[in-house]
Image: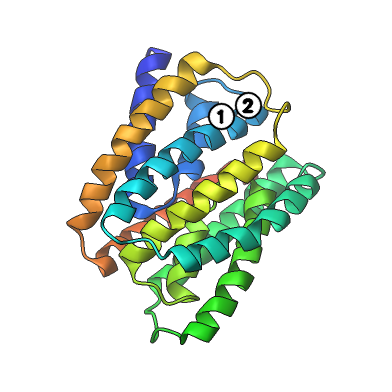
Amino acid sequence: MSPLILALAAGAVIGLALGALGGGGSVLAVPALIYLLGFSPVSATTAGLIIVTATSATALYAHARDGNVAWRTGALFAAAGIVPAVLAGAAAGRLPAAALTTAFAVVAALAALRMLRPCGAEPPERIRSAGAAGAGAGLGAVTGFLGVGGGFLAVPALVGVLGLRMKQAVGTSLLVITVNSLAALTARAGTGGDLRWDVIAPFTGAAILGAWDGKRLASKITGPTLQRVFAFVLLGVAAFMLVDAIA
């Protein structure tokens, strides 16, 4: 199959994930770039960040128009993760790829299981502010360590730790993804490998269009249903990556 068709198809799926679920783009983008489009791991992670940054910013705008972004909480959450993301990214380069893949799978599975648990009452504002800083720093470290945007972890943290509604958590996670991905791209400047823009450009375009469709999909699905869908997607990704690491 033509690389252009593969790029368009993969981009559309990733855009749907980001627009509807507020995460999962990096999880899907990097394997698609490596296994379907022949990118090296270094080039794929950098290209994935480019794609996810552009798509997340677009989807963020769409969710913000409907008031589904908690700007204060999201900004604190994102800002707290920038320095840990840079430091963890430097440490991750010293570990074997299999170890990183296994860690990724375990963290994704734990996040999915947390999403399947019923949420308690919304925490008071004081606890939410402190929780945003702590959870944001931890997410930033994991994001830098695993080299992904972090939406698949941001949504469970925003729901479970900070007490946001699911749809508001989806929108707010896109703010976190955009900031974290931009920070990671800055840290990777000059080390991205051979970036094939003839593939990245159509991939990104399809992802942006898919994000708008995903946002409309999210508006038609109830919060609990969206949460369960997100959790099962995470479990599937975790299982695939764990099998790949062991093989």
Q: Residue at x 59, y 42 (%)?
A: 182
Residue furthest to the right in view is: 94
Note whether residue 43 is visible.
Answer: yes
Note whether residue 231 is visible.
Answer: no
Q: Which residue is tagged 2?
A: 43
Please, is residue 177 above or below residue 158 in the view?
above
| Residue 65 left/right relative to 172 | left
Q: Which residue is tagged 1?
A: 47
Measuring from the top left, give residue 221's x and y in whole percent: 20, 59
Q: Quadrant of residue 227?
A: bottom left
Q: Secondary structure at mark 1?
A: helix
Task: Count the numbered circles shown.
Answer: 2
Mark 1 to mark 2 CA distance (whole Å):
6 Å
| Residue 156 left/right relative to 194 | left
Q: Residues within 10 Å of mark 1 (few under 14, many from 20)?
A: many
Residue type at the position of mark 1: Ala
Q: Secondary structure at mark 2?
A: helix
Labels 1 and 2 touching (C-beta < 8 A): yes
| Residue 197 left/right relative to 159 | right
Please, is residue 3 above or below residue 192 in the view?
above
Q: Residue at x 54, y 53 (%)?
A: 150
Q: Say which mark, if any, is on residue 178.
A: none
Q: Nearer the viewer, residue 148 or 1?
A: 148
Q: Nearer the viewer, residue 107 or 121?
A: 121
Measuring from the top left, give residue 181's x and y in whole percent: 57, 44
Please, is residue 9 above or below residue 186 in the view?
above
Q: Residue at x 28, y 53 (%)?
A: 65
Residue type at the position of mark 2: Ser
Q: Quadrant of residue 81?
A: bottom right
